């Protein structure tokens, strides 16, 4: 008998529905019922939605809670190198044996009926969380919020909505207000909600939803404030002021994410020690991550090698702002993107910070944007652009011309995952 593996079961799960994304909760409720409703047996849940920053914010909340000695389950998506990254049990990535066991159980209970990959794997995560004790559960929305497979909780402990911007228009709507309606779908009656910085159009929707449900809001710029001063992070709310280290995660946008994380921690009763741990101990791969070891780094020689998985216009702006703060150095992009993304919107702010862009197609990704189209989009916003067959070839071409370059591999979490696997 051939031993089962999580990869084999995940491959079978991919075939259970013709679409990767099909937003409805009917299939999720059916399977959760068959699994005896594990969503009702979770440790207290902090549920996070938003277009940008929810993963980083979750990582900081987790670091803060763990700094208090709390045990924390966490669910994130997509994974970068291995599926196991999506499910943390008490702070540790789920083991292969445990993952295989719960996936197999969910596959069997589903009985071959249509269900998307994200839906059935989310049910598996909830099952694992329900069966393992912890002090808190952190759930990150996969897409949207209102009809996301994670949105099956009657009363989480807390909800968090990070900045909402235009993304996934084909699923969530083509205006900021429509997208905000989907994100605000995680707000629950009477449950407090931490709200990160928002455009007025999005905030109006969030406030209207909260008012209808009687959910207390704690909004950036109204109820909590965050800034930087002399290399320190300054946070203030009605409970007082905190003077903290800067976040370990780089970028001005991470200061705002840190503010949301601190607001959440303060609501949960965390002290200054926990908030400091949130700043210093958070780790979140492929968010302006400096690569320091591995074959790609060795091949890069004197060059700096960075990795970022941001992929929409707001992420491009945040990345450009961060590059502008780094010491001056010739900066070259290696970029691969999905064909569902606003490639021009992503690249436009980066044009002022980069000397060139080398476009590649994302290896093994059916929905990759062809390298030629990425290069054309780059040229349309003023970037010098060319194509390469793969990252290694792109890297070699850049190094041949500029050995001391700063090289940023960017444009997609799927590309980032490839890099982390290959460079491991």
Image (spheres, grey):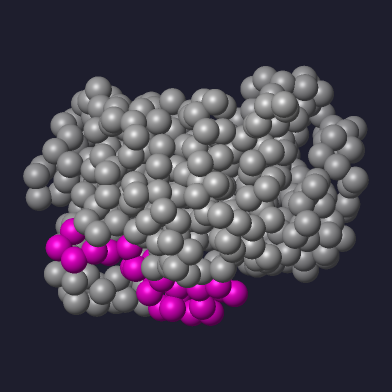
Which residue sits at x=19%, y=71%? 213
User: What quarter of the picture does the C terminus occupy?
Assistant: top right
User: Is residue 304 something that shows in the picture?
Assistant: no
Magenta residues span 169-191
**Does residue 149 sit above or below 297 in this rendering?**
below
Query: Left or right: 250 with respect to 201?
Result: right
Residue, far front: 1
Residue 280 in the magenta stretch? The answer is: no
Q: How many marks?
A: 0
Of helix, strand and loop, which mostly describes the magenta segment? helix
Which quadrant of the view contains residue 212?
A: bottom left
Which residue sits at x=77%, y=65%? 377
Q: In the image, residue 157 lies at what x, y percent?
A: 21, 49
Nearer to me, 4 or 168: 4
Q: In the image, residue 141 lies at what x, y percent?
A: 43, 55
Nearer to me, 356 or 343: 343
Which residue sits at x=55%, y=47%? 108
Q: In the image, residue 270 lies at what x, y percent?
A: 17, 35
Which quadrant of the view contains residue 203?
A: bottom left
Q: In the image, residue 143 lies at what x, y percent?
A: 49, 61
Which residue sits at x=15%, y=49%? 237
Query: Left or right: 37 with respect to 243?
Result: right
**Does residue 298 sit above or below 55 in this rendering?**
above
Nearer to me, 239 or 52: 52
């Amino acid at each position: 008998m051939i031993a089962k593996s999580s990869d084999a079961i995940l491959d079978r799960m991919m075939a259970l529905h013709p679409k990767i994304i099909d937003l409805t909760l009917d299939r999720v409720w059916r399977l959760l019922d068959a699994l005896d409703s594990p969503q009702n047996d979770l440790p207290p849940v902090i549920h996070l939605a938003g277009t940008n920053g929810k993963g980083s914010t979750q990582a900081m909340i987790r670091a803060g809670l763990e700094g208090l000695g709390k045990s924390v389950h966490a669910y994130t998506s997509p994974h970068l190198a291995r599926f196991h990254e999506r499910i943390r049990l008490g702070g540790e990535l789920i083991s292969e044996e445990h993952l295989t066991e719960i996936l197999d159980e969910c596959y069997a209970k589903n009985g071959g009926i249509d269900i998307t990959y994200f839906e059935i794997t989310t049910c598996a995560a909830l099952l694992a969380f329900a069966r393992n004790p912890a002090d808190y559960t952190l759930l990150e929305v996969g897409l949207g919020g209102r009809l996301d497979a994670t949105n099956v909780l009657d009363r989480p402990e807390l909800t968090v909505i990070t900045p909402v911007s235009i993304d996934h228009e084909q699923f969530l709507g083509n205006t900021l207000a429509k997208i905000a309606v989907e994100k605000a779908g995680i707000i629950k009656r009477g449950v407090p909600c931490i709200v990160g910085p928002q455009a007025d159009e999005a905030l109006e929707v969030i406030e209207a939803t909260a008012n209808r449900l009687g959910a207390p809001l704690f909004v950036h710029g109204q109820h909590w404030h965050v800034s930087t001063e002399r290399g320190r992070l300054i946070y203030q709310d009605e409970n007082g002021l905190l003077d903290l280290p800067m976040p370990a995660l780089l970028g001005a946008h991470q200061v705002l994410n840190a503010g949301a994380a601190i607001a959440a921690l303060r609501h949960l009763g965390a002290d200054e020690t926990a908030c400091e741990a949130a700043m210093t101990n958070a780790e979140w791969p492929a968010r302006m991550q400096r690569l320091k070891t591995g074959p790609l780094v060795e091949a890069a020689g004197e060059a700096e090698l960075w990795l970022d998985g941001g992929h929409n216009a707001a992420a491009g702006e945040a990345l450009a702002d961060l590059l502008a703060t780094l010491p001056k150095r010739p900066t070259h992009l290696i970029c691969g993107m999905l064909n569902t993304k606003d490639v021009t919107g992503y690249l436009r702010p980066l044009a002022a910070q980069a000397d060139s862009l080398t476009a590649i197609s994302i290896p093994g990704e059916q929905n990759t944007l062809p390298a030629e189209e990425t290069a054309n989009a780059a040229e349309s916003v003023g970037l010098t652009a060319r194509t390469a067959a793969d990252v290694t070839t792109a890297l070699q071409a850049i190094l041949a011309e500029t050995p001391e370059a700063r090289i940023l591999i960017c444009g997609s979490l799927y590309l980032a995952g490839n890099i982390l696997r290959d460079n491991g």
